[in-house]
Amino acid sequence: MGVKASTLFMSLLLHAFLCISENGGEHSIAKEAKNGQWKKSRYDYIIVGGGTAGCSLAATLSQNMSVLLLERGGSPFGNKKILNIENFEANLYDFSSNRSTSQLFVSEDGVLNIRPRVLGGGTCLNAGFYTRASSSEVKAMGLETGLVEQSYRWVESVVAHRPPPNEWQNAVAKGLIEAGISPYNGFTYDHIPGTKFGGTIFNSTGHRSTAADILVQRANPRKLTVLLYATVQRLLFVTKDETRPKAKGVVFIDADGREQQVFLKDGKSEVIISAGALGSPQLLMLSGIGPAEELKSMGIKVIMDQPAVGKGMADNPMNTIYIPLAIGIPVSLIQVVGITNFGSYIETCSGFKFYSKSVGKKDGIILQKVKGPLSKGYLRLDNSTNADDNPVVKFNYYDHPMDVQSCVKGIGTIEKIIKSHPIKKIISPSTSLNKIMNSSYQAAGNLIPRNPEGWGSLEKFCKDTVITIWHYHGGCQVGSVVDGEYRLLGADGVRVIDGSTFLFSPGTNPQATVMMLGRYMGVRILRERLGPSGGV
């Protein structure tokens, strides 16, 4: 995709959404990386990335171990743009500086996407839906069921809420039932086939809870150091002869733009990478762990040839249908989901654009997201050794025919919902299903060329209107890059704990499971070092 096309489209998008950035205030638990206050210390654990997994991981490990958490972004505390639901889009689409909480990237597929840059990670940007992985997914991940349950509950005690009643969400829930997505399961965090209301990280007043709140409420501040605007550039390794490389510390750029080094204690200490599905494989490559020939071509010293780094990248494709309504409806983000038996999840929100070029505030949005997905892509470095620069990524949306069929059935279900009695009561009288589909086809905010005369088939509709739901994952997958305890294969003193390790996106929305995984692995690591109780 050409740079000019991307720039032109983003100028239109930013004109619609962008407002002045607000910087979050410092909290006593997190300080900007200045003045070298960390230089005299060595740490049991250095965690790279204070995001969805990193915060719960750091909070857990700090109960008994010294932890340094390095976050390349700033603080969410006191930032109304992040914390107020009404500012969801202004926050999500603010790319106004290199310190904005959102960092735009455009995949090679022509789909616009966002990379978080803030303490709390994606929980500071996303649409808030909180729902667990299914029991079969937990089993497929090889996790201990009892500790998974405990870890979910630990997370939920800080960030999860029951959403308030909403006329639009109720209407879509009834439409899902009428369209055959049954039974109705009411409100639950659990992943159950049928239609349900899930949780949210927004409370009843529209205030967002984030993974950073877990640090405030659950961390041991005497054992935890959190540095903001600290961008880790590479890991440092001890390598001798033919022995396995062992991590000894990291190199990072501090808040003043100076290069710094920080080191682990000896023995069982570890660097844990929790930089997300783009940042984690990128950081391994910058550290000399990845496809050897690719690294050599960029002048990066090869520590370990690991061709699986950056492979298996996937992003669950989303397609949205925009529905003009006859009534005014309040802003709402994801609350209702239809969990189908054909690999599509049906969700809804109201009053937002979601990468649309022309949607008004009276619109309702119904979307389908493909489970899995089965289509896979790759990530590679983009001729830059700066970890703040985006790598090249291609997700190959709808490359697998079963993903296409899931979308076709999902869009067909949305058409049934639009025709259902609860939706027909509030839909604009001047519209029709054909108008809705045609306008949604043209409105989708991506860089994929579309036929001005229409979409022709649902298969083409799916492929032409694909956008992201920000659930991208892979690049450091369990079994090929890390083992079942998330230790880097072939090296010592390194783990990767975040969504980059996933083989699929768990549940209808993964944030609950990513936060759970941070807590889960923190407990397991402490038990490994300290015995069965782990001190937690």
Image (spheres, grey):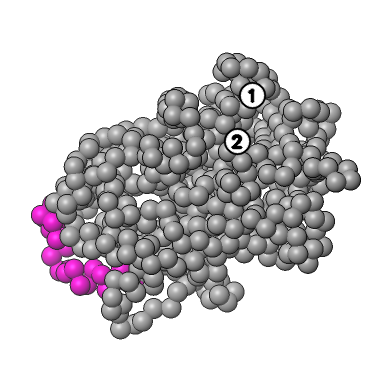
* Magenta stretch secondary structure, dominant: helix
Q: Is residue 416 visible?
A: yes
Which x, y percent locates residue 90? 46, 53
> Which mark sits nearer the N-terminus, 1 or 2?
2
Which x, y percent locates residue 473? 52, 52
Q: Residue at x 55, y 52 (%)?
A: 474
The answer to whether the residues at label 1 and label 2 have Cβ atoms under 8 Å apart is yes
Q: Nearer the viewer, residue 403 or 126?
A: 403
Which x, y percent locates residue 476? 61, 49
Q: Nearer the viewer, residue 441 or 7?
A: 441
Pick the quarter of the image with the C terminus: top right
Amino acid type of the residue that numbered disc 1 sits on in the rendered structure: Glu
Taking the magenta stretch, the answer to whether it contains residue 27 is: no
Q: Residue at x 28, y 75 (%)?
A: 457
The dot on residue 528 is: 1
Q: Which residue is mark 2?
A: 485
Q: Nearer the viewer, residue 76 or 142?
A: 142
Question: Against 96, is 133 above or below?
Answer: above
Amino acid type of the residue that numbered disc 2 sits on in the rendered structure: Glu
The dot on residue 372 is: none
Pick the quarter of the image with the N terminus: bottom right
Which x, y percent locates residue 301? 82, 56
Question: Against 235, is 373 above or below?
Answer: below
Q: Is residue 227 visible?
A: no
Question: Against 255, is 2 above or below?
Answer: below
Span highlighted in magenta in the image? 418-442
Question: Against 67, is 369 above or below?
Answer: below
- For the residues labelled 1 and 2, the Cα–Cα distance comes to 11 Å
Q: Residues within 10 Å of mark 1 (few under 14, many from 20)?
A: few
Quarter assignment of residue 51:
top right
Q: Residue at x 83, y 42 (%)?
A: 243
Taking the magenta stretch, the answer to whether it contains residue 435 is: yes
